[in-house]
Image (cartoon, rainbow, N blue to C red):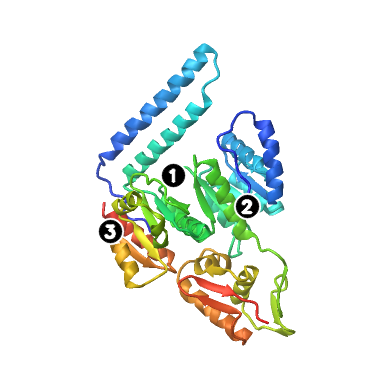
Amino acid sequence: MASDTGSSPNPELPAALHRLRSTLARLKAELELAETDGAVPPTMRLLEDVREALAHLGAAEDASQRRGSVLVVDDDARLAEITARGLRRLGFDADASSSLRNLRAREVLIFDLSLLEALDAAARQDIRASRPIVVTGATDAGSRALAASLDASDYLVKPIELEELAAAINRRLAEE
Amino acid sequence: MWFWPHQRFSSCSRNAELLIIAAGIGGVTAKLLVVDDEPRTAELTAALLRRAGYTVEVAASGTEAVARARSSAPDLMLLDYEMPDMQAPEVLDELRSGADRVAFPVIIFTGARHSPSDQVIGIERGATDYIVKGTDRQVLLARVRGALRERATGDRVLVRGRLRIDIGKGQAFLASKELKLERRPLLMLQVLAAREGEAVTRAELLEHVWGSTFKGFEHSVEQAAYELRRALKEPGWIETVRGIGYRFVTQP
């Protein structure tokens, strides 16, 4: 279950709100200009602005509630999706992927160790920096050492119970 | 697999035709019910889903959603969390009305990214998934497909060598002898046999066989596997795949 969201002011919030307002202002100006000129608004650019505004809104939501989203990365795409869906039912904003993508601020990474081999040093460094929750099918010492080398915040062995994973995510979020 | 041309809002009519053809090949014919009290949101969501080849109806309130679902159940419902007459959990309660699960998957559309208490209510009341408003449409379509897949039961009678599973009647036979199985081991056998030769994860078995209850699942899956093997009497049909789950292997 979700941890207490806390109530003290968070310095990230004003920054995220500032960026949100800037993006919306740009969007408005672009539309007003098109209106004055009787021109067709630049759809692609506006769409990009809307996506950006939603991302800033997301950052503001995360900051105001001291929570983040979750990314489940597993080479088995269906398993990743089922896990993410289960986490969404438990109240987490969870996404699934069968390969690593750039992490958002405050995003908790749940990472299947078997994907590590295919990654270069830079990607490993990114994973390490995110203090991931590492998931593995193996319990051998080698796997544990690999998890330790990734500075994992938790190490879970498949099959994973969803509540166990949720508890690990909450522990990871509580560290911040 | 069929692909969705990203970010093409203009020149829609030709794209729409292409997409409907593509969706036809993929076999998308499900009927969806979109429920939202905000008419533009409802219509835009419906339009997006229609372009992906689905048949879509729209309801403008919780009351209307319940009435429509009762007169003709959809294959999937997309339900706005917050409506003036009812909230999503109340709609789910109405839809269950005594039965232990809603008969079709329900995806809840919510404006709040972080509302743990509300969503936990959603699990208990049988929501299949959640989508935050403003989520990219490719993701929305993927979640709709995922929820529909969960519902698909496949063929009514499965035959695997000497094993015959009659899903409609809830019976399984090895040669001509009926296997004495409870509902859940039988469902598990059905899921495994349908994906013959493939390792099926415990998480997937749990999702298909036990619905949305996750508590104590490992034990339940193992117990069901034990009962299955005991009923089958012959070794080899149900293999344990260490660290993953189980695999069905047809025996000579």
Q: Please name the residue shown 62% across and 59% down the image.
A: B151
- Amino acid type, callout 1: Ala
Could you say where residue A21 lies in the image, as x and y percent from the top left?
37, 28
Left or right for A162, reference B45: left
Marking on residue B112? 1
Which residue type carries mark 2? Leu
Labels 3 & 1 near each other (Cβ < 8 A): no
Tell me, for residue B76, which label it has, or none: 2
The amino acid on which the numbered mark 3 sits, given as a three-letter code, is Asp
Give the labeled residue for mark 3: A151
Closest to the camera, between mark 3 and mark 1, is 3
Element on which disc 2 rests: strand
Q: Nearer the viewer, residue A123 or A166?
A: A123
Residue drawn 55% across and 65% down?
B211
> Distance from label 3 to label 1 (Cα)?
32 Å
Q: Residues within 10 Å of mark 3 (few under 14, many from 20)?
A: some
Q: Is B148 located above or below residue B112 in the figure? A: below
> Image height check: is A58 above or below A44?
below
Tag 3 and tag 1 share a subunit: no
Closer to the observer: label 3 or label 2? 3
Residue at the far bottom in the pictured view: B233
Note whether residue A27 is visible.
yes
Mark 1 crowd level (few <14, some 14–19, many ≥20, 10 Å Cα): some
Question: CA–CA distance between discs 2 and 1?
Answer: 22 Å
Q: Chain of mark 3?
A: A
Q: Residue furthest right?
A: B176
Q: Quadrant of the N terminus of chain A?
A: bottom left
Q: Is residue B85 visible?
A: no
Instruction: Tell me, yes or no, whether the two marked residues, 2 and 1, touch with CB atoms within 8 Å.
Output: no
Picture coordinates of residue A109 (x, y %)?
Answer: 37, 54
User: Is A76 displayed left or right of B161 in the figure?
Assistant: left
